[in-house]
Amino acid sequence: MPQLLIVLFFLVLGYENAAAEESVAADPHADDHGHVVLEVDPALTLREVVIRTAERDPGHAVVVARHDEADALERNAARLLAGAPSIGADYVTDGLSDDDGYRQWQVGLQLPLWWPGQRSGRRLSARAAGAAATQAQRAHWLEVTGWVRQAIADLALARVRLELAEAEWRAEDELAAQIERAVALEELAERDLLLARSASLDRRLLYLEAFEESRHSEGTYFLLTGLSSWPGEWSEVLADHDSFENHPLLLLAAEEITRAQGELDRLTADQWGNPILALGTQHEREIDGANYDDRIMAGVRIPLGRRGDAQVEIAGARRALAEARRDRGRIERELRGVLAEAEHRFALSSERVSTASEQAKMAAEYLRLTERGFGLGETDLGSLLRARARSTAAQQTHREALILKQSSAGEMNQALGVVP
């Protein structure tokens, strides 16, 4: 029975090795299922990725619409008249009674006028809308930058984990092959071979998990950017903390307050309606055959009282202004919280790298001594495998710490509102 189990084990092992060799030979970077293979482009910069992503993101249309709205508000505030002019005509005759030939007709032009200072609210809203459109574009770029920063950091981490997992799997597989030769020479027991092969299969499973994670991160990056390459150098220089005062979201919120104030001023000035200047000519004759008397008419119509719904509109504008001020306060509070968290992570990143580096060196030295002891027969296979696992974990922690430190600088710039 033991011999039968060993035979079955080697049959399964041969199948696994064949599948592994087929997987490696197929090259994980060549996908037949529509997966886009990402390549490192040394010439590609983080800013270029952000620009291309921002242009293809649906939020770009909102920014364009904001600029169009600001242009329309500016044209509206620059109008010479308060409304569209109108033309009126009247005709009078006595043809229904005596029909002496009395005729009168007149034509007039009515021009709505502005009250003094009535356009100031419109000008304020137009200026604020233009500035808000500019800040909205910066905010859009900042939002896209955050997505790109996260996608690249995830991709870099996944690549490191895949690289280490594959290297460890191949190392364990090579160790198992060496032990298999030693078992054939009766230098080691078969149970050592079973342990080595089991460790190799464990590493293969970890490699497959890392491979899947890498594919997911590549797919996420491609869906976001539409690019089949990613920048080889994406580190950032930490920006000055004074840049927080120029954060696009804060400036955008401030412009929204200004625009809401302008809208309140406009409605307040519009509640009495507009005066109308009337200009025209009048032509009249008393009897048939007489000459027409021609006159020039001019007059002004002044509305009395407020419009019926003016107070309701003004109350709604005051509410919108209060909401804009509330939103600005909440945005600042949230951004300061995000900045504080980013500062903490960035402050700890250097210490994390230093500690992980020291740990990786110690684990590598321990592995070196354990391998020497195993070669001399002073250390068993289980101790060697544990030393390998410890060394691999330490290397992964160290390399991940380096990437996280690089990413934390980007998180700090993101919190400060800096676009590369």
Image (cartoon, helix red, strand yellow):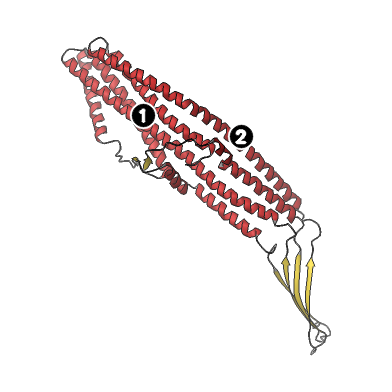
**Residue 7 visible, this orientation:** no
Extreme left residue here? 185
**SS type, badge 1:** helix
Under mark 1, the amino acid is Arg
Sequence-wise, the earlier of marks 2 and 1 is: 1
Pick the front one: 207 or 47: 47
Q: Position of residue 240 (x, y in %)?
A: 53, 36
**Coordinates of residue 64 in the picture (x, y in percent):** 53, 52
Residue topped by disc 1: 161
Q: Residue 286 placed where, x, y %?
A: 83, 85
From where the camera sits, is residue 355 visible? yes
Asked which quadrant contains residue 91, the reply is bottom right
Q: CA distance from mark 2 to mark 1?
A: 36 Å
Q: Nearer the viewer, mark 2 or mark 1?
A: 2
Residue receiving disc 2: 333
If the image is split into quadrants, where does the N terminus sit? top left
